[in-house]
Image: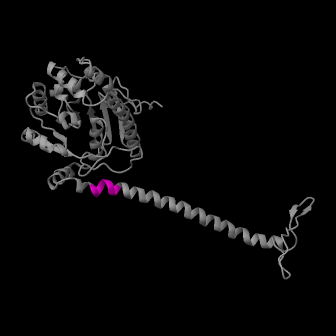
Amino acid sequence: MLDCRGDKCVGPVLPQVIIDKGKGLAYPAGMESRIRKKVPFRIRLAGKIIGKYLSLGRKMDSFCRRCENRYYTRTWRDELDEESVRLLSLNADLKGTKTGKRCFVLGNGPSLKTENLGLLSKEDVFTVNQAARNPQFSLLKPVCHFWADPAFFVIDENQAEDRELINVMNSINTPGNKPLCFFPVVEKGFVKRFQLDETLRVRYFYSTKLITPDFSGEFDYTMRCPGFHGVVLWAIALAIYMGYSEIYVLGIDTTSLMVNMKSYLGQNDETDYAYGITANEQKRLSKMVRRQSLVTQADSFIQSLLEYEILGRYCEARGIKLVNCSSITLVDTLPRMSLADVLANHSQPQQTVS
């Protein structure tokens, strides 16, 4: 404090603190009241500064979320033609149609061989990729089927292995059941080229940006959705969009990296999938896997594990039960139950492995 009582300020002059035995610290007369008047003001000032800081943080967070939503909702239309936008809009009739119900999403891992899929004949089931090769497929009544891997759409009609794949795509329909069959909308030319839309109930989806760990938006299959490294994850996202409150996943052994290494060596066999491998399919797999480096495939494998964790947290935050029922699996970030316990409807999911 400066002493400015004269012509010049000659300070600093510090307030004298009086030490009174039994009373502790005390200030000279008049000083204490002036301090008391200033303290609340300073506290209020500090509160305002902190409040503005926190408000700015909330505004920045809100701004970032708006930018993310804008990315997913506004700009995507500029990337597609009018026909693609129209095709995506058809998925609006699926939103929330299964609220409160349960479904089963089936991968194609070899652990599926140990399950009696006939037990799911009256359940809502999602299947993926070449599930039609499974000898138990005819026991199911899938509501939706997914094709997502771009490798499936690189076809040479002159090659027997590629023609066989087209036949498998057309085999998704079974007597008395025609599931909605989802393809990437950017592959609608492929669908028309092989006239798949004449035999299948074709629907489309669109993804260009991979899901991020902090994703908190809504899955909307009428527009651009976050993408994944595994087709089962897309099927789970669709189940969320449709409103299912319980989603049970089977056959996600997630051994794709090991399978790809065997494909690279031309050594695929029936132990790799939930179905047998023909000579043509083994040839196609060996050819397909060489289009990407093993480093890229290893990274994709790791990312798919992380994406299961992301969807697990996403579902937990929204009260959706996402449970891994695979008897053998590398996905350790989801609660576990056996299929028998789920169908008996009396068990609770085990705790997630930490």
Q: Quadrant of the N terminus?
A: bottom right
Q: Is residue 211 visible?
A: yes
Quadrant assignment, res 228: top left
Q: Is residue 253 visible?
A: no
Quadrant assignment, res 179: top left
Residue pushed farthest bottom? 7
Residue 346 as seen in the image, left or right of residue 165: right
Q: Nearer the viewer, residue 1 or 311?
A: 1
Give the magenta range.
69-75
User: For the image shown, how many numbered marks are present on the structure?
Assistant: 0
Quadrant assignment, res 136: top left
Colour mapping used in the image: one colour
Q: Residue 212: where, in percent of width, then height?
A: 38, 44
Residue at 17%, 42% (x, y): give it: 187
Residue 196 as seen in the image, left or right of residue 235: left
Q: Is residue 132 magenta?
A: no
Q: Residue 159: where, in percent of width, then height?
A: 10, 27
Q: Residue 347: where, in percent of width, then height?
A: 38, 30
Q: Main secondary structure of the magenta part?
A: helix
Q: Residue 30: where, in percent of width, then height?
A: 84, 74
Q: Is residue 71 magenta?
A: yes
Q: Is residue 72 above or below residue 319?
A: below
Q: Nearer the viewer, residue 319 or 3?
A: 3
Q: Is residue 57 above or below residue 214?
A: below
Q: Nearer the viewer, residue 23 or 253?
A: 253
Q: Is residue 301 above or below residue 8?
A: above
Residue at 9%, 25% (x, y): give it: 160
